Amino acid sequence: MSNRQPVAPQNAHPLAGQSMTGADIVVQVLADEGVDTIFGYSGGAILPTYDAVFRYNDQHRRADGGAAMPLIVPANEQGAGFMAAGYARASGKVGVVMVTSGPGATNTVTPVRDCMADSVPIVVICGQVPTHAIGTDAFQEAPVTAIMGAVAKHVFLVTDPTRLEATMRTAFEIARTGRPGPVVIDIPKDVQNWEGPFAGHGTLELTGYRNRLQAVHDNRLSDEACERFYAMLAEAERPLIYAGGGVINGNATKAMRHLANAWGIPVATTLMGLGASDTTHPLSLHMLGMHGTAFANYAVEDCDFLIAIGARFDDRVAGDPVNFAPRARHIAHFDVDVAEIGKVKNVGWHHVGVLARDLEALLAYGRRIDFAKDFATWHAEVAALKQRHRLDYDRKSPLIQPYAVIEALNRIAGGKAIITTGVGQHQMWAAQYFDFREPRLWLTSGSMGTMGFGLPAAIGAQFAQPERLVIDVDGDASMRMNIGELETATTYKLPVKVVVLNNYGDGMVRQWQKLYYKGRMSASDKSLHRKDFVKTAEADGFEFAERLERPEDVEPTIEAFLAFAGPAFLEVIIDPDAGVYPMVGPGLSYDKMITGDFIASRSKPDDEEPGPSEMF
Amino acid sequence: MRHVISVLLENEPGALTRMTGLFSTRGYNIDTLNVAPTQDRSVSRVTLVVRGSDAAIAQLNTQLAKLVDVVNIHDMTLGEHFERELVIVKLKLAGHALPAARGLAERFGAEVLDESPVSFTLQLTGLLREVDEFVSAAAGIGTLAAVARSGSVAVSKGEVTLSSYSQQHRLTG
């Protein structure tokens, strides 16, 4: 794959050799890449390409009469970025953003970094001031390559228009291959207006990147590696799979489930890995980590063989890496990114390769050697942990408990709906109390933790999966961040369901202030804020916009809310003191987990009062 | 510990910034940095010297190796290698220092690029220690008007080349 020359494909592109403008080339490559939705906001420096999209759509109609490549316009470019991210996460395809120079581009910095941190493939096309004006502090100019270079998987500034076509195609390739991520293409206006021949094929050379991809692709799991893996599994009494977002990004859910089910290995997933295992399965332990289920974290404490798959021992999972999985005699690590091997925790066995293929190969090897091991005792222990340490909360409270709201939503959604969230307590409650029977249903800003992710991500996801029920479970503070996108949902008649769990403040910040700052609620209380969310939703065209205030109304209101045909908004006034439990404090090991008043702990509560923490 | 890292990098605008950005965002200062195109003008060879724990630099190198622009990378300090630096020194001479300046050039084997009774310009290529000694000896003869050092450049000993390090990371282990 290295040194490959652009070779004309056997079936030449029907438009090969035609003269086109740069803008038309951009749009043609988007069409060739199968792009069916663009999220973006116009402006001076991207106008030629917006015009090219208009003309393309004028000439190419879908069977239903709709535009082949509709441009979905947000309130703010950050919204466009998260819509593309939601689209990409829900579909597995590359999300596309198209924005103008300067503020248009800088408003997408947060979603670009968010996509990098969660390995989500998007391509951001930014208009730039004309080549001759770059660096002159021109109107709406920003140093996009310098800014984005630090946060994106890759960034291109196209100064040579003859390389525009190959650059566009290469951007998609980089976004989706290896560990996926965001790619930014900065295109000066004169390059968009340039006219030249369209080749219809060709990519940039990228020797190093392609060589590394090829090396990972060629690295099939050897019999010797399989043999060592099964030796560890045979030795184990309590094996545990720790599955991360890589399983979902790598489309390896089926392979991972085959392996787990074939040998009876329980699975705990990370926040990003939710849906990798069917959370209703008896051997699923739901989520581990800082706010994981108590039973998952106890299983991590108990396991003697930990199998990390597409996971990276991040600080929200392994806050204390040395004491993470302390009884594991062996740890195995599968990943697509060699830089993750040994980054946080040294492991005795690792494999970097194509996850789905190599997990199937591992299973096939086990079948070939007639591997058999009875883990019945461990299964019984897991079942007991799940029973004894199940999630629970104050069911007698006169205030609406957020957990009960999510349980009610979950009863109807049945583990088949797409759930998006903002960041904070509501995000963790949703992660804990929803079921996920399939991958790509749980869309959350895991690594970056971007408040305001939920609503635009839900909009993008609904475009990707028009038939799915899409629910944005949001917090009052997260909702405020991108509240302008409420109108985007109604403008495009998207039947998204938006739930705001209102506890009048930054609940997670308050929880930490209670724990670590002696209850000094610095700037986290919003009880004096005057926002009327229901009126806001009504003003933005929501025909269903209600406020839920009484526990006895939870079931019927939620039923009506989810049954509503169009966009629907529901504000729920929840117990402002509801906390997220269990909790493993930052930097601590799982044996220091606190479980709150309603979840059984298997250790005595620690009397030590925690102080302000260096950890985050 | 001091690490000499050699990188083959796409000769593209922004590539060097992205590479050095990985160091600065992690709080590392680059001691020396040298960059120039190789025989293939589309690829530059970068040599940089940075201080940090072996583990931290190893992690940094794996992150560097993920950059799309990076063709290949190797930490020269992990094996035997040759490291050299070039320096050009301009001395301001006072009175009758010219013979001493010529003596300095002879003693170190430095090339005289320009000489006059008041200004003397010398070039030396050598080990870092030699370059350091040369610069401090020069300071004893006249006033150092300019000291231009190239920063380290390095190649590994024997047949190994930077482009043969493609399998530097064990993908299975």
Image (spheres, coloured by chain):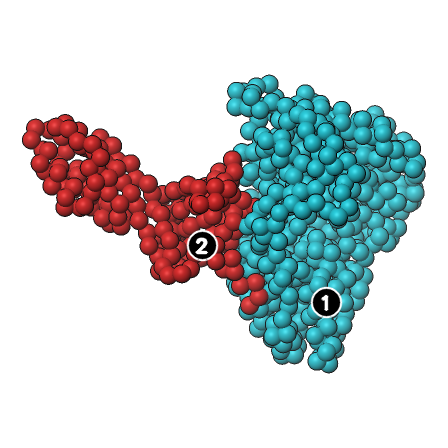
Chain colours: A cyan, B red
The answer, for residue A293, to whether it is visible in the render is no
Disc nearest the viewer among 1 and 2: 2
Residue A502 or A333: which is nearer the viewer? A333
Tell me residue A221's x, y (percent): 64, 68
Alpha carbon distance from label 1 to label 2: 35 Å
Q: Is residue A229 above or below residue A195?
A: below
Point 92% across, 43% down: residue:
A563
Point 63% across, 23% down: residue:
A190
Residue A360's disc is 1
Residue A91's disc is none
Point 75% across, 59% down: residue:
A253
For label 2, the residue is B162
The answer, for residue B152, to whether it is visible in the render is yes
User: In the orientation shown, which residue stands out farthest toward the left?
Assistant: B96
- What is the crowding at mark 1: few (fewer than 14 residues within 10 Å), some, or many (at least 20)? some
The picture quadrant where one finds residue A415 is bottom right
The picture quadrant where one finds residue A152 is top right
Q: Amino acid at mark 2?
A: Leu
Tell me residue A493's x, y (percent): 87, 33
Tell me residue A202's x, y (percent): 67, 42
Chain letter, disc 1 residue? A
Dot 2: element: helix
Residue A531 or B109: which is nearer the viewer? B109
Q: Is residue A528 left or right of residue B154?
A: right
Q: Is residue A481 above or below residue A371?
A: above
Point 67% across, 46% down: residue:
A7
Q: Is residue A512 left or right of residue A42?
A: left
Q: Amino acid at mark 1?
A: Glu
Dot 1: element: helix
Tell me residue A239's x, y (percent): 66, 71
The picture quadrant where one finds residue A324 is bottom right
Chain letter, disc 2 residue? B
